[in-house]
Image (tube, helix red, strand yellow):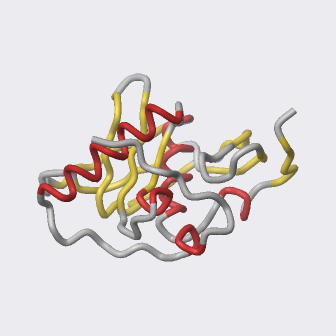
Amino acid sequence: MAILPILQTGDEILRQKCESVDKFDAELCNLLNDMKDTLKNAKGAGLAAPQVGVTKRIFIIDDEEKGIVEFINPVILGTSGSQYGVEGCLSVKGKWGDVKRPRKVTIEAFDRYGKKFKIVGRDFFAKAMSHEYDHLDGILYTDKADNLRDDD
């Protein structure tokens, strides 16, 4: 397992639409393990594969209740409600902005073994799911944010 470098704004990989994962193998498991180590080291809430230079439809979220949840080839099945709040990103260091996100998000995805699951996120977890999902389509929170500001 390893700590991977996190790409920063300006790297073209962050703007690419990611490809689906087609092999659920040891290489995928190693990537997920490295992403977990990287996320914990960075003390972040979530991390998408393109942030570590891999253009695959993968992200992970560290949730207080669920622990680290892995999403492979996620599809948003539905959203409802809205929330507006401050966001940051490990790939946009030193900046914060206010973003409108759904209050509830339902996603269908696969785990590392290729087993399909459905998960409903609410409040902060929904915000994190939406934020990380955007990374898979080359979208950064700064594209949607109001009132962008620097760290004080």
At 48% from the left edge and 58% from the top edge, which residue is drawn? 133
Residue 71 placement, left or right of 15: left
**Residue 1 locus on image (x, y percent):** 27, 41
Choose between 126 and 87: the one closer to the eye.
87
Q: Can you tell which quarter of the image residue 49 is in?
A: bottom left
**Residue 128 locus on image (x, y percent):** 52, 44
Quadrant of the drawing holding the C terminus: top right
**Residue 6 locus on image (x, y percent):** 52, 52
Query: Is residue 87 placed above or below 134 in the rendered structure?
Result: above
Choose between 76 and 32: the one closer to the eye.
32
At 58% from the left edge and 73% from the top edge, which residue is drawn? 15
For the image shown, how many numbered marks are present on the structure?
0
**Residue 104 locus on image (x, y percent):** 51, 44
At 67% from the left edge and 56% from the top edge, which residue is drawn? 141
Query: Is residue 10 placed above or below 26 in the rendered structure?
Result: below
At 53% from the left edge and 31% from the top edge, which residue is drawn? 43
Q: Residue furthest top?
A: 65
Choose between 86 and 77: the one closer to the eye.
86
Choose between 128 and 57: the one closer to the eye.
57
Query: Is residue 20 placed above or below 52 in the rendered structure?
Result: below
Residue 122 placement, left or right of 98: left
Q: Can you tell which quarter of the image residue 75 is in?
A: bottom left
Residue 128 placement, left or right of 40: right
